Image (tube, helix red, strand yellow):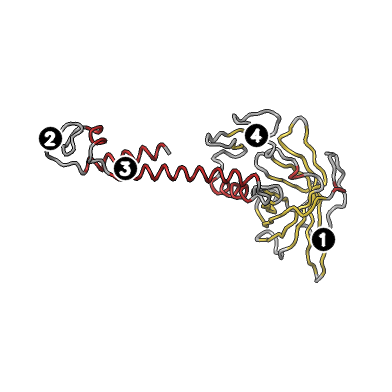
Amino acid sequence: MLRLLLLSALSGLILADHHQPSGGGGGSYGGGGGGGGPFGRLFSDQLDPRLGANAFLIIRLDRIIEKLRTKLDEAEKIDPEHFVSEIDARVTKIEGTHCEKRTFQCGGNEQECISDLLVCDGHKDCHNAHDEDPDVCDTSVVKAGNVFSGTSTWHGCLAREDHVTRITITASKRRKFFTARIWLRALVESELERHGENVTSSFNAKGYYNFASRRLILLPTDDHDDHLAVVCSFNRGDNERAECHRVTEATLHQCADLFVTLEEHDDHDDHDDDHHDDHGKHHGGKHH
């Protein structure tokens, strides 16, 4: 805002100098004289009136913006649908964080960036401690028992009609020596139609959740499995919606888009055991 005021002042001085009469005497404060230097022009009656109008308008806009900021802060406290958080997340997605890959933006106006390996590790690395904020380090997003569902829309790799896909988190664990990630087990199911009949194709997956990027990565547990991996970004400002893609594990080529929402929490699937045994191996086709 100070920059705008200075620019406005400079513009006014230039305009005043441009309209200054060429003749006549007068001192520094003379009403009709030329010269006088910038201070003389600043206080003379030749000062362009638009300077004052611009300054008044800028100050008024600044006050309006400050009031809007206050209202948004208050609205965020009573926003059950996370409307404000979603707007902030969408703006961040468009503008970016101005940080390199595998880094975390600390927030604020300083554009401070730290390694994503330092986020939620129990030590405050950002100057404002944003990397250890409870909202950033919330583990409920991938709590065992969470069931996310949505419609997979294919645009490559396989010729397949749109179908429902469910992702069930079956186990989660934070390792003491590396708390910046949550290690996961999951069951990925797809409801397909084959030969006029509805069938369910599923596979067991393993992966992790990255606090810094809010990304969920799930790969088939069997190294020789040809199923497609799942990559989800919780980029809507809450822990209940995610933008996902079905990708090839080797190249990360996107084959299908999948937007999921938290459908339910199944308490029967709650586990906190990294050695969770795989069960119910996949059946059906190679890819789903």
Q: Relative to the observer, which residue lies in front, 206 or 62?
A: 62
Q: Relative to the observer, which residue lies in front, 122 or 81?
A: 81
Q: Closer to us: mark 3 or mark 4?
A: 3
Instruction: Please provide percent x and percent y for residue 272.
Output: 84, 39
Q: Relative to the observer, which residue lies in front, 17 or 284?
A: 17
Does residue 26 lie above or below 81 as drawn? above
Which comes before the other along the chain, label 3 or label 2? 2
- Badge 4 density bin: few <14, some 14–19, many ≥20, Cα 10 Å: many
> What amino acid type should be assigned to the residue bearing mark 3?
Leu
Task: Point out which mark residue 200 bears.
Answer: 1
Where does the N terminus fall, quadrant-wise? top left
Disc 4 to disc 2, C-alpha distance? 65 Å
At x 87% / y 44%, what residue is drawn? Answer: 277
Which comes before the other along the chain, label 3 or label 4? 3
Disc 3 to disc 2, C-alpha distance? 25 Å
- Badge 3 density bin: few <14, some 14–19, many ≥20, Cα 10 Å: many
Q: Closer to us: mark 2 or mark 1?
A: 2
> What amino acid type should be assigned to the residue bearing mark 4?
Asp
The quarter holding residue 17 reads top left
Helix, strand or loop at label 3? It is helix
Instruction: Please provide percent x and percent y for residue 217.
Output: 72, 46
Which comes before the other along the chain, label 1 or label 3? 3
Task: Point out which mark residue 131 bears.
Answer: 4
Residue tagged 2? 25
Helix, strand or loop at label 1? It is strand
> What amino acid type should be assigned to the residue bearing mark 2?
Gly
Helix, strand or loop at label 4? It is helix
- Badge 1 density bin: few <14, some 14–19, many ≥20, Cα 10 Å: some
Residue tagged 3? 51
Which comes before the other along the chain, label 4 or label 1? 4
Helix, strand or loop at label 2? It is loop
